Image (cartoon, rainbow, N blue to C red):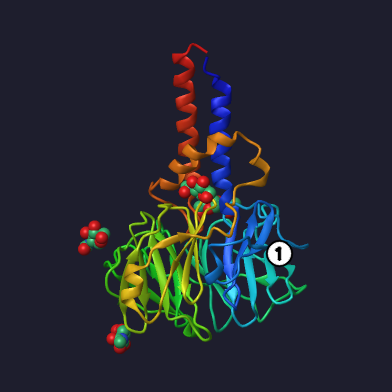
Amino acid sequence: MVNFPSLVLLSILSFTRMALANSACVAFDISWNLLAFGFNGKDYNAGTQDTWTSGNAQDITTSGRPPFNGANTTCYLSQYTNAIYVLGADSSNPSSIYIYDATAKSWSTQSVTTGGFDPTNFDAILDHDTNVFYAYSKQDIYALDMGLLKAANSTPLPWTDVQHPDFATSDYQPVMALAQNHIHFLNVPGLSNGSARIFVIHFSYLQPAPQSYGNFPNTYGQATSFFQESGVQQEFAFIPSDGSATYVINVETNTTQTLKGPSLTDARATYFASNTALIQLSSSGNVSYLLYDPTSASANANAAWNVVSKLPVAVSASSSSSGAGSSKTSSGSGTSATGKASGSGNGASDIRVGLVTIAVATMATLLAMAIGY
Ligand SMILES: *[C@@H]1O[C@H](CO)[C@@H](O)[C@H](O)[C@H]1NC(C)=O
Ligand SMILES: *[C@@H]1O[C@H](CO)[C@@H](O)[C@H](O)[C@H]1NC(C)=O
Ligand SMILES: *[C@@H]1O[C@H](CO)[C@@H](O)[C@H](O)[C@H]1NC(C)=O
Ligand SMILES: *[C@@H]1O[C@H](CO)[C@@H](O)[C@H](O)[C@H]1NC(C)=O
């Protein structure tokens, strides 16, 4: 006999596991060690890229860390300070910025004043040279100056409204990419494929004319910059939500390389790059990488995505006791979902949560009727 309530429960539990993986995040320190935060209640240092496919990552969990229970956690590397800034990692304090000093291996919590900035709905970059966050939230560009902090200051830092962009913002799903101290706004309504609107940080100036960089679709997706050993980033990766390719845009040569799309197609995945690797953290908590050679387009064209087997899969610790056999189908369908993403670049879950919940409820009702439960 079909045990109807446990079917529903399993579906909901395994869905919850999937959703919770977006509470984790990955980042690099300035020695290009891959750091993984909020993985089943722990944080890890997975070392440099030559070591990712053997052994176990070092547990670096320590006091003062955030609970990593937010819906859309994002991490940023401050290269001058070797600090990781973590946003959205504490659902009770959604605006707090947690700072991990990767040299001292210690945490502190920076409070902020949000003004009009919405900490639950934004996309952001951390500017390399100024160490200032720029975010798009509520149709405006905001900034928050981190100074050179690697430990929190007792004075709250303000998010300040910089300007309202001149493009159509009412339905804009932001895609922001940093290179050469310029913010590249992708997915801007009306732009040609391969183009970006450029915000010049040092002059707080949104260039009116789009810049063409070659060929990538003008669509929603995720972007992250490749670091240099030192100095400003010159390239960024753009992965459209359909995962069909990985585009690497070089803002010096105005060209785009088209590389393999990630093995896991996942509109809710997040990405982070070092100088020579691009990492995907899927919404099912799996971590994969693509090696990147800034000097060899032919090597990049042949590069394949691989699993960082040194890291565990970031499922939620609290649900790890739920039906072990149930997650495969659910997380598989979750990660292959290519439904149109909506909302900010930090993961557009809520509409899909709603749809999936309705779908689960509908199936459950039909099933209950069919079996006369
Ligand atoms: C997570 O991101 C989605 C999509 O941007 C947004 O609707 C939701 O409010 C966010 N939730 C939190 C708690 O940040
Ligand atoms: C833009 O790129 C998309 C995806 O490659 C393609 O379907 C579309 O036709 C292109 N649009 C134009 C105007 O070329
Ligand atoms: C890239 O485009 C900008 C703006 O059009 C231009 O100033 C620059 O010379 C171009 N770079 C190259 C290498 O073509
Ligand atoms: C994530 O990794 C685990 C462990 O390697 C694997 O069993 C699972 O199939 C992966 N999930 C997806 C969606 O590939």
Residue 54 rendering spot, x and y as whole percentages: 56, 62
Residue type at numbered disc 1: Ile
Residue 174 rendering spot, x and y as whole percentages: 44, 62
Res 323 quadrant in image: top right
Residue that lies at the very extreme toward the front in this rendered image: 54
Q: Which residue is mark 1?
A: 60
Binning the other alpha carbons within 10 Å of mark 1 as few (below 14), some (14 to 19) or many (20 upward) gives some
Describe residue 67's horizontal placement relative to residue 142 as left or right.
right
Describe residue 329's horizontal placement relative to residue 21 as left or right.
left
Q: Residue at x 38, y 49 (%)?
A: 340
Q: Residue at x 50, y 78 (%)?
A: 227
Q: Residue at x 53, y 33 (%)?
A: 11
Q: Residue at x 63, y 69 (%)?
A: 85
Residue 8 rendering spot, x and y as whole percentages: 54, 27
Q: Is mark 1 within 8 Å of ligand 4?
A: no
Res 158 quadrant in image: bottom right
Residue 137 rendering spot, x and y as whole percentages: 51, 62
Describe residue 184's horizontal placement relative to residue 100 as left or right.
left
Res 132 quadrant in image: bottom right
| Residue placed most toward the observer, 307 or 212 | 307
